[in-house]
């Protein structure tokens, strides 16, 4: 039977959450102390709003292999993965060696170093796009991609998918995680500001469409003929659980966009290396005009890359678009990136990730079947999530229907059981690293079985 907020027994989910939050707080007295002092000079008591969780942010000490340790000394299997960046795990020997060696020879000149040539060549091979530049965050990469599309086409409008997050620059801060009462009709979704401080004039340049619907893209292009510079999307949505593209969707939108003279931009900041060596670009065979990479690329050091066709990236090559940044191609980031691509993200390690993912998936599906819950497990390479809903999620509006309390309770029970996950329960996914073992994923599966058992006790299962 399906589990929804209206079913008998689910009222006690709130009680379960309350009890788990108390356990969570009891386990972390030092985090509580640090939060109390941090707020004096650190705005909001954290270094990014996404580090703030309910009931409180977890302050970290260090990481090693597949584990992280909080300031109270508690060990966790790390499946948070620093929001999708830590595919190498922690203190991977190849990255420690590369970074240590580079640190001794100076870390910043604002001039290129030779590693950049090797990396650009390797990315060209993996993503089948010839020209590359570097930046420092996913936000910078998607910002440059939007600028490049506008510069290359001489057009201002951008088509963006409802519920996709592409970083925190103005052009993409529209309909990121809107509420159900804000989104408007599906046939013509509202452009909902994703933050305060986003000018109306910028929002008006963004046309919102649902994911997995080529007809909606065709409609948007017809309504704004020859005015759309590009459509930007995650080729697998990964900021609303995991939503894969339907068969043929990516090819269909590419063809529609190209027929109108518009470009296709993949934001592979999350999917880039977590779903395979050349991301969804390689897996789908539908190569975009521009691809944005970050997160896992640097093996834990801040770096980003933008790759594209000769036509579009030629604007950088001949100076029509100035792609700049003091820390672009920073030698420390380049050293870590080269080590990640050459020694961490190898075919043999991808086979290991696939094996760990399959083991976890099998265990979770067995538990779900045992309790007859109508949930399903969605995996994409090293990424995965459990969708607490009977029907597959095809677009953001389906995702809005999921009871957020289940994701939060699951997060708390994993945490209290020694597995660290991203705090935004139903929004985020787990990430496996190349250093994870069978014991690590089994700990997750055991916690999940406990979670299912307590929910079943509330009468929520058939
Ligand atoms: C798909 C996607 N694009 C872009 C970004 C922005 O990356 P960053 O936080 O490095 O600026 C994120 C961050 O979560 C993301 O998930």
Image: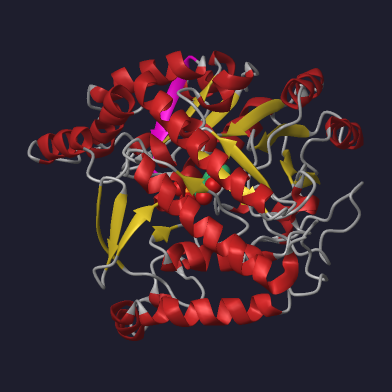
Is residue 96 among what the camera can see? yes
Q: Quadrant of residue 250?
A: top right
Total numbered labels? 0
* Residue 453 picture location, percent across and down: 60, 64
Quarter holding the C terminus is bottom right
Q: Residue at x 61, y 31 (%)?
A: 266
The structure's colour scheme is: secondary structure
Most common SS among magenta residues:
strand
Q: Quadrant of residue 439?
A: top left
- Residue 136 highlighted magenta (yes or no): yes
Is residue 147 among what the camera can see? no
Q: Residue at x 59, y 77 (%)?
A: 16
* Residue 355 picture location, percent across and down: 45, 30
Q: For this view, does 459 lie left or right of residue 152?
A: right
Instruction: Give the answer, above or below, for where 23 lies relative to 272.
Output: below
- The part of the chain drawn in magenta is 130-137
* Residue 58 picture location, percent across and down: 38, 70
Q: Residue at x 88, y 58 (%)?
A: 184
Residue at the far left in the pictured view: 104
- Residue 243 highlighted magenta (yes or no): no
* Residue 289 picture location, percent across and down: 61, 22
* Residue sitting nearer the eye, 58 or 388: 388
* Residue sitting nearer the eye, 398 or 213: 398
Quarter holding the N terminus is bottom right
Instruction: Give the answer, above or below, for where 71 lies relative to 150.
Output: below
Q: Residue at x 66, y 71 (%)?
A: 457
Q: For this view, does 305 lie left or right of residue 367?
A: left
């Amino acid at each position: 039977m399906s589990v929804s907020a209206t079913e008998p027994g689910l009222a006690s989910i709130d009680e379960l959450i309350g009890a788990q939050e108390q356990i969570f707080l009891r386990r972390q007295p030092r985090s509580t102390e640090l939060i109390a002092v941090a707020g004096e000079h650190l705005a909001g008591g954290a270094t990014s709003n996404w580090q703030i969780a309910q009931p409180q942010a977890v302050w970290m000490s260090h990481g090693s292999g597949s584990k992280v340790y909080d300031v109270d000394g508690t060990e966790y299997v790390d499946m948070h993965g620093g929001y999708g960046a830590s595919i190498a795990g922690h203190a991977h020997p190849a990255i420690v060696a590369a970074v240590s060696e580079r640190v001794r020879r100076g870390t910043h000149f604002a001039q290129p170093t030779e590693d950049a040539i090797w990396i650009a060549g390797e990315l060209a091979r993996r993503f089948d796009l010839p020209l590359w530049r570097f930046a420092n965050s996913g936000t910078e990469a998607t910002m440059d991609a939007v600028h490049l599309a506008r510069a290359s086409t001489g057009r201002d409008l951008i088509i963006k998918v409802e519920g996709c997050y592409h970083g925190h620059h103005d052009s993409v801060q529209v309909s990121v995680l809107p509420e159900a009462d804000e989104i408007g009709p599906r046939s013509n979704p509202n452009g909902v500001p994703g933050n305060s401080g986003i000018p109306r004039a910028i929002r008006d340049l963004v046309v919102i469409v649902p994911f997995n619907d080529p007809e909606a893209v065709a409609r948007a292009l017809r309504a704004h003929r020859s005015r759309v510079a590009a459509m930007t999307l995650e080729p697998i949505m990964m900021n609303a659980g995991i939503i894969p593209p339907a068969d043929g969707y990516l090819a269909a939108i590419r063809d529609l966009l190209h027929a109108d003279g518009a470009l296709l931009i993949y934001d592979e900041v999350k999917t880039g290396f977590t779903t395979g060596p050349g991301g969804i670009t390689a897996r789908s065979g539908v190569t975009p005009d521009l691809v944005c990479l970050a997160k896992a690329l640097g093996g834990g050091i801040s770096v980003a890359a933008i790759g594209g066709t000769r036509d579009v990236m030629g604007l950088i090559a001949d100076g029509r678009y100035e792609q700049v940044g003091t820390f672009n191609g920073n030698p420390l980031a380049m050293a870590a990136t080269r080590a990640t691509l050459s020694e961490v993200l190898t075919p043999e390690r991808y086979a290991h990730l696939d094996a760990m993912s399959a083991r976890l998936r099998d265990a979770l599906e067995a538990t779900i079947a045992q309790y007859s819950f109508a949930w399903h497990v969605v995996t994409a390479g090293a990424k995965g999530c459990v969708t607490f809903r009977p029907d597959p999620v095809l677009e953001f509006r389906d995702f809005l229907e999921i009871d957020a309390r289940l994701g939060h309770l699951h997060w708390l029970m994993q945490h209290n059981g020694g597995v660290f996950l991203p705090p935004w329960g139903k929004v985020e996914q787990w990430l496996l690293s190349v250093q994870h073992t069978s014991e690590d994923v089994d700990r997750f599966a055991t916690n999940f079985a406990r979670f299912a058992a307590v929910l079943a006790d509330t009468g929520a299962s058939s």
